[in-house]
Amino acid sequence: MVRYHYALVDDLISREEFDKRIEQKINDCGNLADEVAAALLVVRDLDRSHVKISKLRGKSSLFCFYGKVIALSEVKEFDRADGNKGLVARLTVADETGQSDLVFWDEQAASIKESFEIGEVIEVIGRHGKNIKEILPLNLRKTHVEIDCAMNPKEVRQPQRKDICLMIINLQPSRAFTRRDGTVGEMIVGVVGDASGTAKLLCWDPVMLIGYTPGMAINATGILEKEGDFGGREVVIDENTIITPAETRPQIPKTSLSDVLPEQTVTVSGKIVQASPPRPFTRRDGTTSWVRNVRISDGTQELPLVIWDDEAIRPLLTTDSIIIYHVPSRIGRTGEIELSLGRGSCLLIVPDNSGERTTICGTIIQTPDGKVIDNGVQSFLIECKECHGIDLTISGIACGRRLFQEDCKQSEFNSQDLRTNLSTFIENLS
């Protein structure tokens, strides 16, 4: 039974620690509290007994919250992949911090209008559905809790076909997916931008993006634009879209850190002023990933940045100048607005005005701080795909400890350069 209670806080403490706290609560109560009551006390101590709707985007497996019913959808019938009919309906609930949709299926969907009325307040235990804006209720009950909130459901932007000029910011490697009919296809996820901001990109036919790389501009005719998470947007390339190269790149607007508000998706720039080491953690599926806490400043404000997964182990230096595209903002545990960089965002390290053009011939060396190119006299941190031990000639912009490459080619062995480097190395030792 208490596994449901643990799911409310499983992003905060381990199951072992949760069980220890339950035992401690039982002891503190003189064995008068049973396991369920003690679990409820532990959840309450961690401030997760009931969360506000604005906090439903957290990382716990389950959420417990109160919501006032403000809208009931019509029951819709659809065809399942196995050929059977299904039913779906939505119940919109709200509190003073926001709104969320509860999704009901089949028999529960059919009886939604007989079970609920506008204005009623219900207590919900549920988990995320297909996206963070939907909750699948596992248990709910009507309550007498008072909630003072707006009764107008938030208007959802309907998907539209548009003709847009976009700049490709990031493209992830293609990955397989399974269609409803059981067949397997491939898709590409990325980030794009235009004069109105950034968007998550979904491409259901990777062949359409062959030859296009980050930094290039495209004309997308008939692209599908729809509302995304955290107030953002998504654009979808499908069989109705035509992609052609564009001559000019659109300018993507940036938000000053002092103007960032919670529950937005923004593009920001600044310098890293503090970077803690990456920390490993275990996902719910048992795999290991990484998280890292960073602070950035743009001169108007300093904000915390939380970096997740593989991006967290990317070499970062204090004083690095960065641009972060399509990053969501939220209220952190300390009450401060923070940025959360996950797979849907893109972080670029860029040269600043102090950079100088240079060319270096050296060897790629893998170090604990990342890959460097070293010629025995100079050493620069670089981002490249070449392996440890490869000799390269790299031209680019040197900024502090980094070299931002513009041209790269494999070096030919030069015995004279080797003699010169050895002589310089020996002189430095004496």
Image (spheres, rainbow, N blue to C red):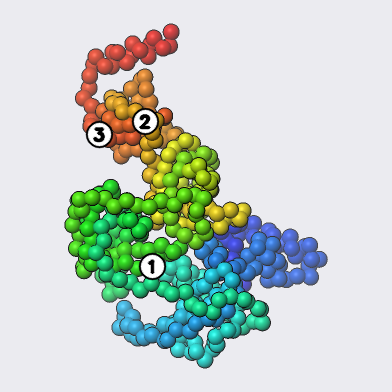
Residue 3 quadrant: bottom right
At x 58% / y 73%, what residue is drawn? 95
Look at label 1 and name its amino acid.
Answer: Glu
Mark closest to the chain's N terminus, 1 or 2:
1
Query: For numbered disc 3, what is the local secondary structure?
Result: strand
First along the sequence among labels 3 and 1: 1
In depth, the one of 224 and 22 nearer the eye is 224
Q: Is residue 99 above or below residue 278?
A: below
Residue drawn where x is 48% and y is 40% of the image: 272
Mark number displayed over residue 277: none
Q: Which residue is mark 3?
A: 407
Quadrant the C terminus occupies: top left
Q: Nearer the viewer, residue 148 or 363?
A: 148
Placement of 83 over or under 126, stated as above or below: below
Q: Nearer the viewer, residue 254 or 337?
A: 254
Q: Given the image, on which type of amino acid does mark 3 rest?
A: Asp
Image spot of residue 427 (x, y percent): 39, 9
Alpha-carbon span between mark 2 and mark 3: 16 Å
From the viewer's perspective, is 206 left or right of 326?
Answer: left
Find disc 1 in the rendering and name its residue.
Answer: 227
Label ID, residue 355:
2
Foreground disc of the pair 3, 1: 1
Residue at 32% from the left image edge and 51% from the top image edge: 251
The residue lying at 71 percent from left, 71 percent from top is 37
